[in-house]
Amino acid sequence: MLRIRGTVGDLPVDLTLELDDGDWARLGAQLQTAPTPSAPTPTPVKQNEDLWQHAQDLLRKAGQLNGLELLDQLEGLAGDAGAGKRLLVRLRHSAKVKVSSGADTPLYSWIGD
């Protein structure tokens, strides 16, 4: 028997699982054969700075983009959603970028240089 107690959001959870010997054996076999997730390899600093430069160039050349368009282009540039979001946040806090409220999404305008 396995008991799990905790919360999901604000809801309390008290779950009891009853496993027989065969269930425990299959679970143990799965745990032994499951691949161990590898730690993500850190992105080299040079690559981060190149991405940052390209992100700035992208907005500078466009002049102004709404947040959804900019995020989409940054995700394509960086190769994944997480890296694209990090670049968007970095642009938002850059002194070279002005962020203003648009109708549905923020507008990012290049003011640097």
Image (cartoon, rainbow, N blue to C red):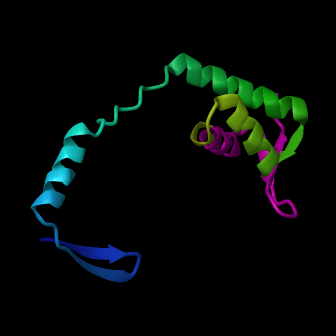
**Residue in the picture at 14% in, 58% down:** 22
Determine the residue positioned at 89% across, 34% down. 62
Q: Where does residue 113 sit, x and y in percent of width and height?
A: 82, 27
Whether residue 96 appears in this view of the structure is: no
The stretch of residues the image draws in magenta is 84-113
> Where residue 35 sits in the image (x, y, percent)?
30, 36
> Foreground: 64 or 85?
85
Q: Quadrant of the N terminus?
A: bottom left
Please, is residue 72 above or below residue 55 in the view? Answer: below
Q: Can you say whether 44 is above or below 103 in the image? A: above
Q: In this view, does 69 lie above or below 21?
A: above
Q: In this view, does 5 lie to the left or right of 50?
A: left
* Residue at the extreme top: 46
Q: Which of 68 and 58 is in front in this view?
A: 68
- Residue at horizontal 34 percent and vertical 32 percent from the top: 38
Return the x and y of residue 44 as percentages of the image width and height. 49, 20
Q: Nearer the viewer, residue 17 or 72?
A: 17
Q: Which image quarter: residue 73?
A: top right
Does residue 91 show up magenta in the picture?
yes
Q: Is residue 104 magenta?
A: yes
For residue 28, say whether it is visible.
yes
Residue 4 on image: x %, y %: 21, 72
